[in-house]
Amino acid sequence: MTFANSMNIKLLFFSILFSLYGLEVSSQEPMMLDKIAKDESESFKNEQGHLFSNAHTQNYNILYHQLIFDINPSILGIKGMVKSYVQARENAITQIDFDCSHILEIDSIKDNQQSLTYVLDINDVLTIHLSKTLAIEDLDTISIFYHGIPSSTGFGSFQQTFHDAMPSIWTLSEPFGAKDWWPCKQQLEDKIDSLDIIINMPKGNLAGSNGKLVSIDSTSSTTTCHYHSNYPTATYLVGVAVTNYAMFTDTIKFAHDTVPIINLVYPEVLEAEKLLNVEFSNNMHLFDSLLITYPFAKEKYGHAQFGWGGGMEHQTMSFVSHLDFELGAHELAHQWFGDRITCSNWRDIWLNEGFATYMTGVSYEHTYEGKWWMTWKGNLMRNITRLPGGSVYIYEDSTSVERIFDGRLSYAKGAMFLHMLRWKFGDVLFFQALKNYLNDTSLAYQFAETANLKNQFETTTNTNLDEFFDDWFYHEGFPTYHITWKQNSTNMVNIVVRQTQSHPSVSFFEMPIPIYFKNSFMDSTIVLNNTSNNQEFNIQLPFHIDSSKFDPKLWIVSANNTIINLDEALQADNLVVRSAPNPLDKELSVEIITEHDGQARILFTDESGRIAIDQQQELFYGYNQYKYDISKLSSGYYILYVKANNDTYRRNFVKP
């Protein structure tokens, strides 16, 4: 799921054309991902009272749903029939529970033609008393007839909005909203094996939903759209949207399949949306080539425009605000990651959102001649490192929607975690591991947790990844690299790598690190296997270096890195000291560059000579950094003294 942020398009022609349709024009430039996920979490804040699992739904499986909905987009409300084929998972079952909002009105519940008794309580548990006792693997059929005005947060779960003064009804159930508009089993434990979704609506409207479009039938006053799916579907991925849609279709041919594409858009923007959709087929082929064939090829893929500022990856038909490049790529990627394989709990939401985010970046890598690939990675890197802590894995309360849809962690850091795995193993092994994960028969069209993905990477690469996952995924923060280098007359380069960590949960981030060296005629990127602090490397190069850069292609999540040529930095001196900020804030930073190991005395006094800081620090060859908390110091003038290697550095500071 993603939230689209509109920007000005780069081509004047598009700007003029879109103005004719009264639309904001979406740029293909990468969005700000923090805004994307922030708005996703905002859409579910009011769902906090409806988050907890109904444990009683675990005694049966859903084999089939027939969902018949009567929806008039002019009227906020729904009338429905949910027919379910259930199979007992335990012996001696006399009742089963569905998740169902107590705001809905249950008209009747039947087993074939026999009426059943039931209780719908204030906790949204619909308890149905069966007409017979079920033994394990016994089947039963239950039909629930209901109506009502579902609760809504203003973004979903069941919403009425307007476009060009025309009404629209649409649903968005992730993560906890399915039961707001239909009786169901919404936990991440059981996918619906097959579905028929039949939507009756006033003539002049069309409906989008899951699966193959079986038929569109009309009478003098009504239209009925019938969709059918034989692919297992997670409950939160069931969606319905109804309005006066215009439809345009396409087919995409793969080596062994031809996939129909159905797009339902507002008629007033039909031509504009067609233009926005021009890169879609390229992304479909790209994902097919890098991953596996589109997972729902026997049915369809499509888009239904809806009245929310983003998108939702309903299986086989994503609901989107516009057919925008980035939004389309993100929701399309979810068909592999989130729909074919769904996270088994919301703590592992990154298996959905981190993957969809990363594959969107890969789309930028392979489109527009890669123009926006570095911009996209830079945006994510800045987002991740703007705060010192945070893990991809959700340790906090996993019913917190804001934490589930944390753009910095579930989306950006999840995506860059994958990017670092790709860097560590290279493209061939990385994408093979993803194919193996997607093709795992125990996971395909079912649920997965992070351990399943880790096992596939370990098997594919023959590598133990315990430490890598512990540092970069389960624990918090990121490294800062301080690199010094010096080249002798034979072009041998001595390199020392020092690392500091933004969060104490990780003592050291092991990672192969790239360093780029060049002069006017030659260049070289070397990769150092950095496994310890103050690690020293000697590399022979065939040229004399005039400049250097750390991680120029942004493979590694890090920030505030330094790379220093010692010859240039030290010149005739054997000590360089840098200190900041001035005026002072809450922290004093002291950086020391030296050619010698040893000791440094750092003395910080007020103007009368009273000592605020007096510390002996171990000094290492190359780059050293020390930070001191000065938040409690009074306002006034201060003096910093640094004494090391028989040199003394002095600087005056002011604290406002």
Image: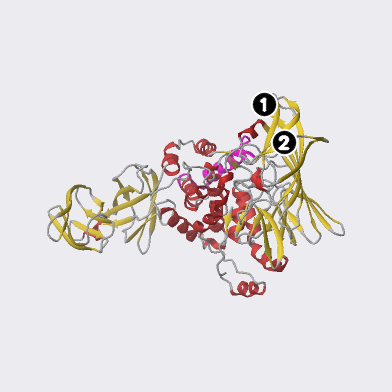
- Nearer to us in this view, 528 or 269: 269
- Nearer to us of marks 2 and 1 is 2
Question: Where in the figure is residue 73, as x and y percent of width and height?
Answer: 73, 59
Q: Kindly indicate the quadrant of the structure image that contains residue 281.
A: bottom right
Residue in the image at 32% along x and 59% along y: 545
Question: Where in the figure is residue 643, as x and y percent of width and height?
Answer: 15, 54
Up the image or down, 227 lies above or below 8; here it is: above
For numbered disc 1, what is the local secondary structure? loop
| In-image side of 232 versus 471 (left or right) | right
Up the image or down, 521 lies above or below 66; here it is: below
Question: Where in the figure is residue 614, as x and y percent of width and height?
Answer: 17, 50
Badge 2 crowding class, 10 Å Cα cut-off, few under 14, some 14 to 19, many 20 or more, is: some
Residue to which mark 1 is pinned: 90
| In-image side of 243 versus 593 (left or right) | right
Three-letter amino acid code of the residue under disc 2 = Tyr
Tell me if residue 489 can be seen.
no
Magenta extent: 423-447
> In the displayed image of the protein, which residue is found farthest to the right?
220
Is 643 magenta? The answer is: no
Q: CA distance from mark 2 to mark 1?
A: 20 Å
- Nearer to us in this view, 79 or 136: 79
Is 434 magenta? The answer is: yes
- Nearer to us in this view, 97 or 284: 97
Q: Of callouts 2 and 1, which one flags the residue occurring earlier in the amino acid sequence?
A: 1
Q: Are marks 2 and 1 in contact (CB under 8 Å)?
A: no
Count the marks. 2
